[in-house]
Amino acid sequence: MALIKQIRQRTGLAIGVIAGGLILFLLGGDLLSPNSTLLNTNKNIVGEIAGEEITLEEFAQKVEEFKISFQQRTGRVPSEPEMVSVREQAWQAMIVERVFDEEYEKLGLKVSNEELIDMVQGKNIVPELRAQLTNPQTGQFDKTQLISFLQSLETADPAQQAAWAQQEKLFVQARNRVKYDNLLATSEYATTAEAKLEHKSANTVAEASVLFVPYYVIPDGEVTIQDSELSAYLSKNQEKFKVGNSANLEYVSFSILPSGEDSAAVISRITELTEGLKTSDNDSAFVSQNSELQFPYATYGPGDQLPASLTTNVTSFTKGETYGPFVTANSSYVTYKISDQYEGAPKMRASHILFSTEGMDDAGKASVKEQAESVLADIKANGNFAAAARQYGQDGTAQNGGDLGWFAKADFVEPFANAVYAAKSTGLLPNLVETEYGYHIIEVTEMPNSTYTKVAALELELVASDVTRNDAFRNADSFAAESGNRNEFTENATDKGYRILQANNVDAASRNINNITNAREVVIWAFGDASVGEVSPVFELDNSYVIATLVSRKEEGQAKLEDVKDQVKQLVMNDKKAAMIQEKLAGKTTLEEMKAVFPDASLNDVPGLRLSTSVIPGIGFAPKAIGSIFGLKSNGQITKPVQEDIGVVVGRLNTLTPATEIGDYTSYQAQLSQAASQRMAYQIMMALQELANVKDYRYKYF
């Protein structure tokens, strides 16, 4: 860790971030739900992948690998909220290893030693390395930094060499995944028949009139529903009502927010210290000793943002003056002193578009210059610098519209710096600038500024005092001790005037309960050893002590009627209302006659309705109704009443303009093939996940 941290400090490297990016790439996005699990009675098992049980110890070892990677790229231990992401990356990595490695082996996909060398130091260096090993002045890939890094590994300790070996393993996995995805993606093919259908769907247009009868035209009181009907509906439509692991809780919360006395004490203290700061001869030492900020004394140069709680309260500053105390957004009190203001090295801000000529001969450079001149002319005419930078830029700034941020003249190579600092105003430089890296189109966005400000910040956090916390804990502990079961919980809360709060359908993976954040301990208790009716111990959360009781718990699988009764009842009611609406419309031959039956219904013309759409303007999602309209044979015909989720729809075809035949459907074939190829990585992951039958029990432990 120390080696990589030192390398990052010396060269700006952050090799460790590659691991996280590769994991996300290998997964094809956040595709796997953490709740696809059944309860497992083996308390040492955190999940199953492809029939293989994953032990807690095995998972912990993988988590430790990713924790070390986090430390390498940040130089610090991850916080508990950050550990949530670390654990998730570790789990997803285990899925990838087990699901895809078998596929690679079946197909004989491998990465040779020669290929790996080419990926990390040859002509085809992996994008993850190229993105991180950039020259801070140009944003261009700097191979000398890579060579320096790799050479330093020869004398690194075994742990650091093992960390790089892990990176190389990820490079291999990523390359195999590219090969695997490409094998399937490039096999996608759309037939001429499919292309013709796509053309027809996109270009067949109807002019129609549509009657929309919403369900509310039938009052709920006119519909009678028996429980047997609800049971029958649920039995026929179980796939609509799959449920995950969830629990219903009741809890009492004892606030440990600061009291009025706590607030008064902090105000008194910050006021006293503010007077001391005003007369201090050594502001840095004073705030270092008295402020609760980690870095209470800072210098702000051109482009640096002064503290928001200072700029929102003070419009102009005077050297030596003290401002505050102010209340911050973090519920603290802060006072600022402008210790010094002085003129230093000027900095300015600009954006650029780099057309790289690195390694090119004169002919190649001339071709690049011609392209750059063409883009410059387009920007002069249309003013689309940021868009052009994203399209043509060949360095790390392209995705930010070419923005280089604030920089001093010495930060850049001489031709670039001279051109920028010679500008008399903001705006586009009229000519290309050539440097050793290539041709630059430059836009000056901020003129030079040389004002530097030293600010001393005296901040005290407003927190509950020990007295406040102790009082709250005594009340919570006493309540928990007196409540042996849910009945006693309810009786004691009622007697003492404590408010009982409900948290229904709490997901097994949730980290919050209602508006209480970081309540994972409570959720783990509910899905662990707790039994229905049991009362929890006292949990100390961010701003409260919480005692909970488990009301009920549902396991993943098919829903029971009592769990989804309201949803089922609404759907059954919609079906019955649709039948009643259709019965009342029976025998009516025109939309106008049907509208007269239901005055609250709407009747509108819909021009430009296309076969490829699934939404009727002003009505909503109605694919069955649209299909029925395009299924009519002649103008003036009306469809049968069509039941949709939103109500009943009847359509009349006024005119139909069929798609014209075209001689070449290859463009539609290409569109369909490309769309299918782009979906392939996602579909592969979902299919293999289903085949692997991934089960996740981590919610019991983390």
Image: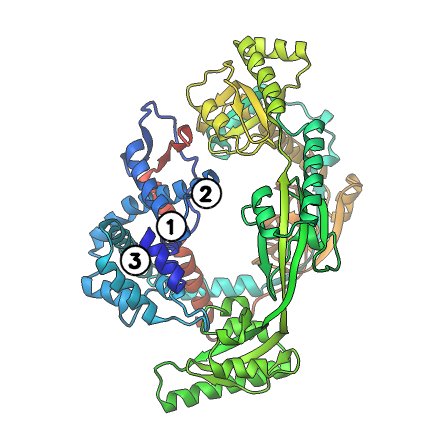
Label 1 vs label 2, nearer the camera: 2
| Residue 42, position as x, y percentages in the image | 31, 24
Q: Nearer the viewer, mark 3 or mark 2?
A: 2
Mark in the foreground, 3 or 1: 3
The residue tagged 3 is 171
- For label 2, the SS is helix
Residue under label 2, please give it: 82
- Decide if residue 295 is on the left or right side of residue 651: left
Labelled pair 3, 2 in contact (Cβ < 8 Å)? no
Which tag, 3 or 2, sits closer to the chain's start?
2
Tell me how far mark 1 sits from mark 2, CA to CA.
Answer: 19 Å
Q: How is the image coloured?
A: rainbow
Q: Nearer the viewer, residue 653 or 301?
A: 301
Total marks drawn?
3
Amino acid at pointer 2? Glu
Label 1, secondary structure: give it: helix
Residue to which mark 1 is pinned: 27
Residue sitting nearer the eye, 85 or 695: 85
Residue 153 location, quadrant: bottom left
Q: Is residue 617 left or right of residue 14?
A: right
x%, y% of residue 474?
A: 58, 16
Amino acid type of the residue tagged 1 in the rendering = Leu
In whole angstroms, how far apart are the C-alphas of marks 3 and 2?
Answer: 24 Å
Badge 1 local density, few (<14 within 10 Å), some, or many (20+)? Answer: many
Q: Amino acid at mark 3?
A: Phe
